[in-house]
Image: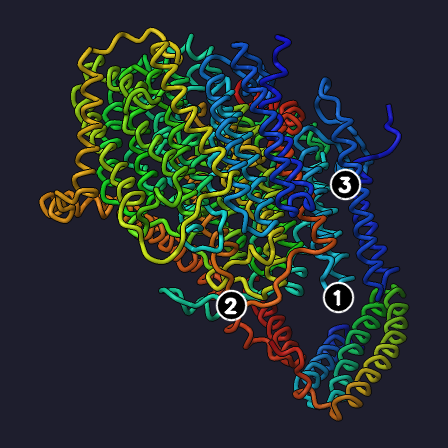
Amino acid sequence: MIGLSAYLTLAALVFSIGLFGVLTRRNAVGILLGIELMLNAVNINLVAFARFSGNVTGLVFTLFTIAITVAEVAVGLAIVIAIFRVRRTVEADRLDLLRG
Amino acid sequence: MAPSIGLPLAVLALPFIAFVLLAVAAPLRRAGRAAGLVSILTMALAFAAALTVWARGLVFEATWTWIPADGGPIASVGLMVDSLSQAMLVLVTLVSLLVQIYSLAYLHDEPPASLGRYYTYQSLFAFSMLGLVLAPGFLQMFIFWELVGLCSYLLIGYWYERPAAARAAVKAFWITKLGDVGFIIGIVLLWSATGTFEFTELFDKAQSVSGLPLIMFLIYLGAVGKSAQFPLHVWLPDAMEGPTPVSALIHAATMVTAGVFMVTRAEPLFALVPEVLTLIAWVGAFTALLAATMACVEGDIKRVLAYSTVSQLGYMMAAAGAGAAQAGFLHLLTHGLFKALLFLAAGAVIHAVGTNDVFRMGGLFRAMPHTGIVFIVGTLALAGVPPLAGFFSKEAVLGGVWEAHLTGPFLMLALTALLTAFYMFRVVFIAFFGRAHAGGHPHEAPWLMRGPLWILALLTVLVGLRLAAGGLAAGGVEGHEEAPGWLAPLSVGLALAGFLLAWAMYQRGVIEPARVATALGPLDFMARRRYGLDTLYAGLYRGIMLGFSRLIGWIDRYLVDGLLNVLSALTLRAGARLRGIQSGKAQDYVYGVAFGVLLLIVWAQLWR
Amino acid sequence: MRPLLPELSIITWAPFVGALLIMFTARHRPRAVRWIAAVTTGISAVLSIHVYAAYDYETAGFQFYEKLPLVPPLGISYELGADGISLLMLLLTSIIIVAGVFASWTVQVRSQEFYALLLALVTGVYGVFVSLDLFVLFLFYELAVLPMYLLIGIWGSTGEVRPRGVFAWAFRETGVGTKEYAAMKLTLYLLFGSAFILVGIFALYVNAGATSFSFLDFEASAFPRGLQRWVFLAFYVGFGILAGIWPLHTWSPDGHASAPTAVSMLHAGVLMKLGAYGVVRVGMGLLPEGAADLAWLVGTIACVNIVYGALSSMAQTDLKYVIAYSSVSHMGLVMLGAATLTEPGLNGSVFQMFAHGVMTGLFFALVGLVYEKTHSREIFKMSGFGKAMPGIATAFTIGGLSSLGLPATAGFVAELLTFLGAWRSAHRWWLFAAVAGTFLTAVYVLRVAKQIFWGPPAHAFHHLEDARGPEWVALIVLVFVLVLFGMVPGLAIAPVGTATVPLLSRIVSP
């Protein structure tokens, strides 16, 4: 029987991989993928807790999250495309208009 | 309320109506001569009303609230008619009227708009001066005191495009304002002590006021500025930059005598402070002498008259200081007549020859006998020759000063009498009898100018005869003790000596003026440089006041504001440093967040 | 008993409605913009005169009362009322804004936004003068201050200040002299001040244990003396910055010099009075003991203001700076009058607010006209303008005379009352500073008038002309008011007295 901690460890691992991706990827699409991983790590947590506590609320939340994630990816990609049209690049290092 | 209030009110209101009319109705003002006629007409009516007031001997007082306050009005305005103001009303309206008529010819060549402006100011002046004369309290007197100062400023600067006139106007305003600073402080102090500005109430309450000498001294400072007493007399000679009729009206007959009038009006108050009175007498006598010496070396005919005015004002003040304010006031009235006459006559001369310099005139008597005669009448009156008006008033002044046992001032005034005759006849001999200058054909002035001259000359003689016939009481001098018998011969003798000296030096050439000048070297040197007073004031103004203001301005800009700018510059710098953190890259920020979370986790772990 | 019309609300909001109308209906129609501005400010002006005349001296106190709860749980309500002081200030505001609308008739650049902001600002000013709820008063106060930033930053003019002295580096880094600098300085200073005000208001709110921000409720509650002192200090600093107290006055010369004509008029003419009004109404009105304890400070700083402002003014070579520093000097007289805690002094103070407002409005209108025709503000380059512009010269002289306190102008009455109060106060020597200030004023005002309008005409300037059409309206209105109130001071003193006497009685015998 796989215990709760194994799920949590997996989630932490996925989250860390996602964070690593967000921090190191140059390409904006790669960053978006990283964000997806982080979100899914949270989903794993939610499902695991729901399973082990017997409360289905977590499952319901996960469904919501998945739906919202889809929307978020759509918006994110749209922004990336919009940036690409203007700047002809999606390199994150070049997108520093907010520099002080 | 007395039904007779209408008359004095009319005297005051008529010039005011003329002023408002001219000030508001621009087309009328720009018409020039029409404006002059309006002003003259109202002035004539005012003169008639003033004469009636005088003839009927109206005496009353009326006041209205001006500044209300919770516990009764703080300040009121009103009319106060008594023997003093009656005489002044007549003098002011008379001289104003004559001067305005005279100006119509004198300023004939002015553009209409300028002429309209001139008459607007003239009407305002007449109103202000009459308001001053009728003032029932110090506050109203101060109000009109300042207004006549304003008119003086505007009229001195009538030819405002001349730098000299502009400078003189501003100088006159500043110097008199300096005296007024003392005046207003004095009034405020007096109000704080008694709670009133009204003369009649003040006369009752003044005994109990502590610090009255200081208060009266401060009030006297106002008179020092306005009546050109030493050391604030420097503005009056410069004021001659204005048109000559203005000099006759404002800077000889009326406004400059306001100080004397004020001291006379407030005599019961000054009588309580003998030490201030003594000071007034000494300053007055000294002013008289000092101005007379400067008049002796002056070559500008108007400036000679200006110094002579300063000198005569000194006389009046000395009399007031000696407790013989009535004598001073009598001198004020007679002086108003003959000095206006002298100025207007000098104006006619200047009009004819086109210069103020007496040394470029000469032999004018033949060319303009009318002007010559009236000028000589004025000169004789000023020198104090009987039976002209000046003799009696001057004798009264000298008598009063002698009675008060002020030997020093008396001697100074006696010497001044000698000098007065000398410098006036010097002008007469040089300008009217000397060798005629080549070039230019001086001609007699038009009747519009000669008329006022003759009227004034006639009055000078008539008033003199009236005084001779009726004694001093006829001139409104009440309760004056008889002067010592030797006084009349003395003053005539002094006048004669001055006349002879001038005759010997400038007519016969027996005594060389240059040699006298060398003999009196330092005095001559100082008098020609006006005793350095103008330089001193200019130095104080440029060096101290402007210098200090530049210093303050610099401090404000570069220290007070500088500190603020340092603060903001430092803020800007700190911002510039910190902005480096703001890379603009989203990933850097996420790094920061992640690192922060990590730190938190570590910290939480260690804590536990 | 309800009045027929909510007069004060109409006065306050009419300009705001005008601003909205201008923004939404008058796009690209400059004439319509001006007429809307003239009509809406005209409505306020007519109503101000009406309430001034309709005020009942016998009952005194706050009249034309209106109340509308806004946030009942916190006790914030829209509460308006006017007493004698407010009435005079309403009248002043109306006069200045009407004159200002006419004086800026010739603004070309983005006049729509300019007028809209100007009108919004005036709403704030009116609001402060009639608000009885301190929270709403504060909101109006901010509304009056903020548009200034845009008005100066966009329509202002840039001057030149040479970096000198030990702090020269700071001058270079902050860009002293530019309009952006001036706008930023002014806004920051005033916001800095309003922070103090807000703290003060909250301190009173908490300490009163009150359930409302109403002025009347605060007035009824007695605060401990220690609290009164520091809250009064907070109000003094907060409102005082707007009144230009030394040494926090340096925003005013830069701000006034950079601002466009109507804004300078409004700012020096009315907004600085807002500060003085705040000190008198909120500071002295609510904290009588604090005011009595700190009067020495207020008065002494006021004396510094008077003399220091006058001397600084004398040192300036830029015409607008001269006028701006003269405001610093005259605001000193306003504060001095209030600090005397005497009836003549306080009446003089309020009268001086009015007189100085009109006078300085006139000055800035004239300077604007001169600048528009010569494109120069350098006094010592000008000369002999009196020939070409006699009307402007006359108006300038009258304004100058009022500023040096010549009788028959409003300035004299104000100064006289202040003098009388000063000698009756606890610190008699204040009188000498005040009188010295008037003499210095005579020196710098006449010096400037002589330099600009007298003397031979300068050759550098051509085609000079006098004021025209709408500009005359501004000048004539201001000159008329100045002389009218100078000759008949009772017009203003009578209503003001009904407000100052009760105020003082609380201070003298708390």
Q: Earlier in the sequence, mark 2 or mark 1?
A: 1
Q: Are marks 2 and 3 on the same chain?
A: yes
The answer to whether the residues at label 2 and label 3 have Cβ atoms under 8 Å apart is: no
Colour scheme: rainbow
Residue toward you, B302 or B428: B428
Q: Horizontal placement of C243 versus B406: left or right?
A: right
Residue toward you, C359 or B516: B516
Give me the disc on residue C459.
Answer: 2
Helix, strand, or loop for circle 1?
loop
Q: Horizontal placement of C352 versus B534: left or right?
A: right
For mark 1, name the chain. C
**Kind of residue indicated by mark 1:** Arg
Q: Earlier in the sequence, mark 3 or mark 1?
A: 3
The reply to whether residue C298 is in sight is no
Image quadrant assignment for residue B50 = top right
Residue at which label 3 appears: C45
Residue toward you, C273 or C78: C273
Helix, strand, or loop for circle 3?
helix
C-alpha separation, residue under disc 3 versus residue under disc 1: 25 Å
Picture layout, residue B342 above or below residue B81:
below
**Kind of residue indicated by mark 3:** Ala
Residue at which label 1 appears: C110
